[in-house]
Image (cartoon, coloured by chain):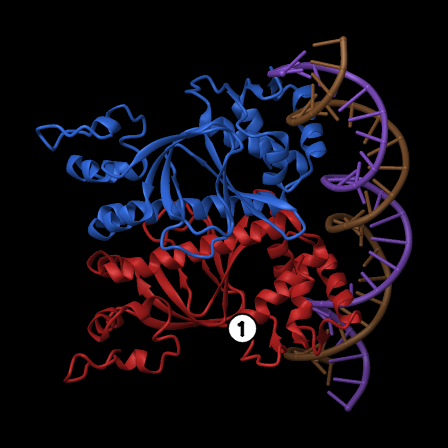
Chain colours: A red, B blue, C brown, D purple
Amino acid sequence: MTRIDIHNSQTPALCQSCEIRHKGMCGALDADELLALSRHTRQVRHEAGAQLSSEDTPITSYANVMRGVVKLTKMLEDGRQQVVGLQFAPDFVGRMYGSNSDVSVEAASNVELCRVPRAALEQLVADNPKLERRLMEQTLRELDEARGWMVTLGRKTAAEKVASFLYLIATHISPQDDAGAAEFDLPLSRADIADFLGLTIETVSRQMTKLRTSGVITIIANRHILVPDLARLKARCS
Amino acid sequence: MTRIDIHNSQTPALCQSCEIRHKGMCGALDADELLALSRHTRQVRHEAGAQLSSEDTPITSYANVMRGVVKLTKMLEDGRQQVVGLQFAPDFVGRMYGSNSDVSVEAASNVELCRVPRAALEQLVADNPKLERRLMEQTLRELDEARGWMVTLGRKTAAEKVASFLYLIATHISPQDDAGAAEFDLPLSRADIADFLGLTIETVSRQMTKLRTSGVITIIANRHILVPDLARLKARCS
DNA sequence: CGGAAGCTTGAATATGCTCAACACGGGTGG
DNA sequence: CCACCCGTGTTGAGCATATTCAAGCTTCCG
């Protein structure tokens, strides 16, 4: 699985081709530590819609997102659903120190993950303060994001919600945008977007149409969006 | 300020009377560590409504809630406001590792805090993995709570939102309730409740009235609530 | 007693939801 | 190859829920 070099301070083969090698959790590790970690990791691939773990199943492994988008959802007994988090590369997925976190984890798009068994990571964290600190920062960032979305959910109109969502996606997955333009594929279906924004799919659809007719976005295909002027989209976010 | 005993493994005088001595962050410390921390702490008191720190001001100190409720809010440019967190004793207040967290911190009720300067705590955390771990767990708990409220904000009706809020308060500040009853003073005004639930004050008021007329709660005074049967209230939460 | 702040209640309105029909695209099978 | 179907997204009409605006009530404090 992992080819070990004669010089053990080399980057592990598995990680050499990893695009997020220096970002996210792994950025906190030096070559030796990375090697130790890589002995336990496995890169896996999932189709859009695949369930990675559900609300009740206890967590048996953590992962880093290498490609694609992972969504975290919570559900009420009667089936109403809310997306409570979206994770992009190089985010860390999974709640440390086990718990009743009660979120269900799904691949929103096709994803590639770097999985690491629970025990292995917890061991590594216990021995490595830098890593623990990095995970703390990731957790704080997630908390900030969750609070940002609470404002959107509680206080913005449907139009503002949809604009905010598009702006989020544009700034997270669209390739370098020097001239203030962005073009991208939405990693979420209309149903997922609705569940994220606390709306119905019809309302999401209508607001997308409004943004299109007012020239803020161009819908190239259902999922393929062009934003000619990000500043103009941002202005619609509140 | 802090009386130092001959035996330095004694609990500091300041902490001896502290009701949350063994809970929250301080629960991670042994007597010596607690002493080290207590050299820097100061217990302070604030009136309801007092601003403890605002969205732009950088953080200069952290605190533990000893009594009362602290609210975290975010505001849009046009003044729309959303409460994004409520902290009860013995919660920790403040975002570690400085940042653009952008929340404004206010005393929701009269509060007593145990303040610790930023540098002192960061030093202590760097030397003490147990403490860091404890703060990580607090952060994860806050994240779970934020996500729980995202479901409420995005997917529940006004009636369910108000019931959920009352249930939250009942289970957090009401004295021991063996028989499934609870009686308490609301630490938040109607305006704050509305900002927490993403509603208007009128809607909050109407829903409280409905809960009263249907016998789920008794409104003893405007802020003083009796819940004869918590299970019945819980059933209204979704 | 008067005034202010916080809370409640009512009537009219608007925003987003429900239900229903239709459009589009990609795959399957006759 | 075309007909058909299924999943996904769009559009419309009517409706319900929560908001807005306005008035009145309580409670607290001078």
Q: Quadrant of the N terminus of chain A?
A: bottom left
Relative height, residue A167 to residue A145 (above, below): below
Question: Residue shown at 22%/56% (left/top)?
Answer: A126
Which chain does tag 1 point to? A
Relative height, residue A129 to residue A217 (above, below): above
Q: Quadrant of the C terminus of chain A?
A: bottom right
The residue most toward the left is B6
The location of residue B171, given as percent across then percent down, is 47, 28
Q: Nearer the viewer, residue B43 or B138?
A: B43
Q: Nearer the viewer, residue B85 or B120?
A: B120
Question: Residue shown at 39%/55% (left/top)?
Answer: B98
Question: Residue shown at 52%/27% (left/top)?
Answer: B187
Identity, as a three-letter code, of the amino acid under mark 1? Ile
The location of residue A17, given as percent across then percent down, is 35, 82
Sort mark 1 into few (<14), some (14-19) or many (20+) by Cα contacts within 10 Å. Answer: some
Which residue is label 1 attached to? A173
